[in-house]
Image: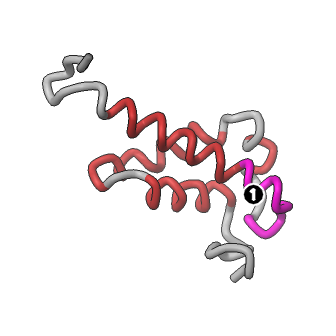
Amino acid sequence: MDERNDFDREEPVLAVVTKLLLVALPADLRAAAADLARRVAQHPDVAPHIGKHWGELSESEGNAVAREAGIVARDVISGAGDATASGEHLH
């Protein structure tokens, strides 16, 4: 393990993004983690690193990847609170 974090240095970046999302998302949204990880992977700050292993990233690159995963998780969580079970948007 890398002393900087809890992720194996040999772990693919996409797998780390998925793990970050699983930690950040509430239980009822965790099933979407793999799809959301692909969304994070498309971000311009993440895309150049998605084929790498976590240990290949600099600290700032790893922070950018983690930041984007957090932003996607936040957006999904806040969006889930905007709709009722029937799909109606709350005001």
Q: Is residue 60 magenta?
A: yes
- Per the image, the residue denoted by label 1 is 62
Overall secondary structure of the magenta section: helix
Residue reaching furthest front?
A: 91
Determine whether 78 is above or below 51 in the image: above
Determine the residue positioned at 82% across, 55% down: 60
Coordinates of residue 20 in the picture (x, y in percent):
54, 58
Kindly identify the amino acid type of the residue bearing the numbered disc 1. Gly
Mark count: 1
Coordinates of residue 79 in the picture (x, y in percent):
37, 30
Coordinates of residue 73 in the picture (x, y in percent):
48, 44
Determine whether 89 is above or below 3 in the image: above
Q: Quadrant of residue 27?
A: bottom left
- Picture quarter with the C terminus: top left
Left or right, residue 58 beside residue 36: right
Dot 1 surroundings within 10 Å: few (below 14), some, or many (20 or more)? some
Determine whether 34 is above or below 16 in the image: above
Q: What color scheme is it?
A: secondary structure
Q: Nearer the viewer, residue 86 or 78?
A: 78
Coordinates of residue 31 in the picture (x, y in percent):
35, 50
Q: Which residues are magenta?
A: 54-64
Determine the residue positioned at 65% across, 53% down: 66
Determine the residue positioned at 57% across, 40% down: 71
